[in-house]
Structures are given as structure tokens and as C-alpha cells.
Image (tube, rainbow, N blue to C red):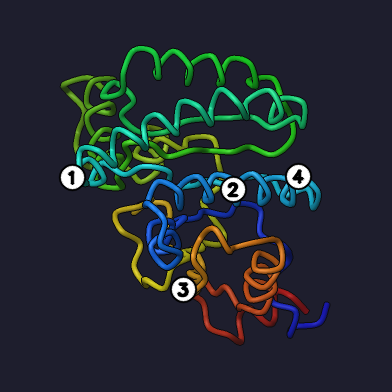
Amino acid sequence: MNAEKKNTRPNHVAIIMDGNGRWAEKRGLPRIAGHRAGVKALRKLIEFAVEINLNVITVYAFSRENWQRPEREVSLLMDLFMSSLQSEVQDLHKNNVKLKFIGEKSSFSKKLQESINNAEALTSSNTGLCLNVAVNYSGRWDILQACRSLINKTSTNLDLKDINEEDINKNLSLVGFNEPDLFIRTGGEQRISNYLLWQLAYTELYFTDTLWPDFDADQFKLAIEWFEGRQRRFGKTSEQVKKVVQ
């Protein structure tokens, strides 16, 4: 194998879909118009991911910090979330996409929670692309709830030295999924914003100035090509990695 060919296509891609509001403002439109355009961009990206047989995509749809936005914007986002879920789930199901929602869903309306549960149930047996949607999610919350869950499941006589990383992994929101290979953030910001803090430990981080509604299949291909050119060492030296791939 050519050592210069560092990676194959990523198995799991995590995405922060940033820049919807700025996209709208640049066009003199209300911010919600940017979020609607962002939904369309996600739909096209999912279609492309299905076409290239990508295994897992995890997108950051709404963070716990997003509740701090103006009440009007949050209300419109919830309405958009509900309407998009109801309008897209049948097409996702027809395309063999499996939906999973991660985050503290109890903060949403009962109607929205019901729609989320119905979408997960409808697509639960699908075997194609797994689409994880992070809603009312934060990485710190994820680690905290994993620790709480572990304590609840464990005998009070457990020696703390017996707790290991795998115990935490088994109680995180993305249990059962490999950690992301590639992280993409659009919109020009270069931070992970409390997203998948545990899972991104060795993920390749790709940042682009492209605003999310403009992030299309060609942009996604660029990100994948960039990933394929990276050398993932996981603590090893370059020489050690080259010996493995030769």
C-alpha cells in the first residue's frame, strides 16, 4: 500500500452546520430564512452521503446554549424542526436512512417529543446511512449524564479504580457508534463549541469559511479529500504509521 495514501473515506462524519443566520443577513433576509436554507442543504448532503454509501453522519442541530437566543428565533426554530421532521422522515425512510436523536429531549414540547419518537421508530430497522441529530445537546452534558448513568447502574461497593474509559463510552449518547473520523464546521469559526467533547479526541478537524446553506456535495468532497490526505497517528510516530500501511 502506498504510504502517501493516508486514509480511506471516513466512516463517521460529525458536522456543525454553522452560518445559517449570517447567510440570510447577507441577503437581507430574516435569520429563519437561513435556517430553512440550511435544512435544504442538509437534505442534499444526506442524498449525497447515501449515494457514496457513507455509514454515519452526526449533525449539531440545536445546542443547549441555543436556548439563550432571542425567544422569537428559538420559537421559529422549534417550528422549523417540527415541520422539517414531519416532511422529511418519509423520504429518509424510503432511502433506508436510520434516524437517531441525541440530547436532552425532555425539554421539548410533548408534540415534538412524539414526532421524534415516531421518526426513530419508523426508521429503526433501516440498514443504510445512520443520521444522528444532536438536539438540546452539549458535550459536557453528555459526559455528565454518562457518569450519572454509570453510578446508577453500579453497586455502591464499586471501587473507583475499576471504572475505565469503556465504562464511560457505554453510557454516552452515541453508544454503539465508532467515534467520528472527520469533523466539519462551516461558517468560518474554528472551535468545537461543546460538541461531542469525549468522542472528538482523535477526530480530524476540518474548518471552512463556507456558510452552511452553501455547503454542497462539491464542498463535502473537498472535506473528504482533505481527510484522505491526513495521517492519523493516534499517539504513534509517522514512521510507526508508515510501517503499518506498507
Whether residue 18 is situated above or below residue 93 in the rendered picture: below
**Which mark identifies residue 235?**
3
Work out how far the residue at label 4 is from the one at label 1, CA to CA, in angstroms: 34 Å
Disc 3 residue type (three-letter):
Gly
Q: What element does badge 3 sit on?
A: loop
Q: What element does badge 1 sit on?
A: helix
Give the image quarter of residue 238. bottom right
Q: Is the C-beta separation of discs 1 and 2 under 8 Å?
A: no
Q: Quadrant of the N terminus?
A: bottom right
Disc 1 residue type (three-letter):
Gln
Q: What element does badge 4 sit on?
A: helix
The residue that mark 4 highlights is 50
Work out how far the residue at label 3 is from the one at label 1, CA to CA, in angstroms: 38 Å
The residue that mark 2 highlights is 42
For discs 3 and 1, the disc positioned in front in the rendered view: 1
Left or right of 190? Residue 226 is: right
Q: Residue 152: where, in percent of width, then height? A: 23, 20
